[in-house]
Image: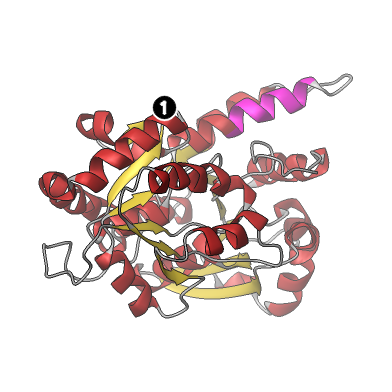
Amino acid sequence: MKILFLEPFFGGSHKDFALGFAAHSSHDVDLVTLPDCFWKWRMQGASLYFINQIKNLAEYDLIFTTDMMNLTDFMGLAGRDLPPIVMYFHENQLSYPLGFHGKKESYLGFANIISAVAADGLLFNSAYHFNAFLGEAGLLIKQMPDKRPEWMLSALAQKGQVLYPGCRFDAAPFALKENSLDKPLIIWNHRWDYDKKPETFFKVLAELKKKRVGFYLALLGEQYEIIPEVFRVAKEMFKEELLVYGYVSSREEYRSWLAKGSVVVSTAIQENFGISIVEAIRHGCFPLLPNRLSYPEIIPQNFHDDIIYTAPSDLGQKLEKFLKDPDRFFPQRQNLSDYTSRFSWETIVKSYDTILEKFKNGS
């Protein structure tokens, strides 16, 4: 097939996904993108940009786009002779947690809902995300004063499918190798933003430092215009432990830090899949993850007792236990690294290609 991939927010996991799919699909993929900024404007105006960039929509067998697109605007501008359109939801504006001064803007949630209704195909990056979207959509519909389109919820439930995003890995999985570090390295490779709850992470580390539990720290992950103050405080508080502070643009250097890492921690309140966690596990990091979001879904059940924590105090205990005897966890690190192969683009792209081919054939 000839596929047109429209990405209105080309950064972070959206960028990884688009590039990974384009590189590994057996189909011919044309990628048209907008930079990852001004996201509200992207949702409102991306369709105007794309419709002006693409000269002949009829030459494509399928359009693949993501959740930052107001799809109904695009379809209205494009006219009737459109190929099938499949929308992939990385996140949605219904269940996304609000910031400190955040205010829910229902028109953004409705844009997601109506786009999902309009799409021929609907894919979500985890079962957790799919269920959260349906639940929040139902709550928003109930706020309508009358003429509530409750039929829409069952239609979306039947239309939607769960398909995990692919991950771009090194050719070789984790293997025990010589590490020059004399203490375990803790990896933070998440976006520097409120929805990743960095204050909880640093509070746990501060308690461990008070107990004189030894560790090094690598603060990786993307940053945007506003950096939470807690990161600046942490730079001073953990100056003896910090080996890297800030986003590493080179993929090779980023992977080298993951390979040096011993443990990766998440304290997120928003995560619909967790590419950064899966990447760290692939390179041998032992994960410590909250009992929420997509994490219990992507980690095998038999590892939950050691990996999934229920409260910050539980995280502190599990992290202290690991840091004091990291060698004990080596077999689990190896097994988990092997497990992540199911998320590689080389493996998972076959499911994408098969599903998308069905839309071309009208099934």
Which residue is pictured at 68% across the width and 37% down the height?
94
Q: Position of residue 49 (x, y in %)?
A: 76, 72
Left or right: 172 in relation to 154: left
> Magenta segment, principal secondary structure?
helix
- Residue closer to the observer: 81 or 3: 3
Q: Position of residue 131 (x, y in %)?
A: 52, 29
- Residue closer to the observer: 141 or 213: 213
Residue at the right extreme of this rendering: 145
Which residue is pictured at 57% across the width and 68% down the height?
11
Check residue 139 for magenta coloring: yes
Q: Looking at the rendering, which quadrant does residue 217 occupy?
A: bottom left
Residue 144 visible in rendering? yes
Q: What's drawn in magenta, residue-wise?
A: 133-142
Q: Position of residue 150 (x, y in %)?
A: 71, 21
Tell me the element at label 1.
loop
Left or right: 151 in relation to 290: right
Kind of residue indicated by mark 1: Thr
Check residue 292 for magenta coloring: no
Residue 149 visible in rendering? no
Left or right: 38 in relation to 24: right
Q: Is residue 198 above or below residue 11?
A: above
Which residue is pictured at 45% across the width and 28% down the height?
311
Q: Residues within 10 Å of mark 1 (few under 14, many from 20)?
A: few
- Residue closer to the observer: 198 or 155: 198
Q: Is residue 351 above or below residue 256?
A: above
Quadrant of the image containing the C terminus: top left
Which residue is pictured at 66% across the width and 62% down the height?
227
Q: Which residue is mark 1?
A: 310
Q: Position of residue 137 (x, y in %)?
A: 68, 30
Q: How is the image coloured?
A: secondary structure
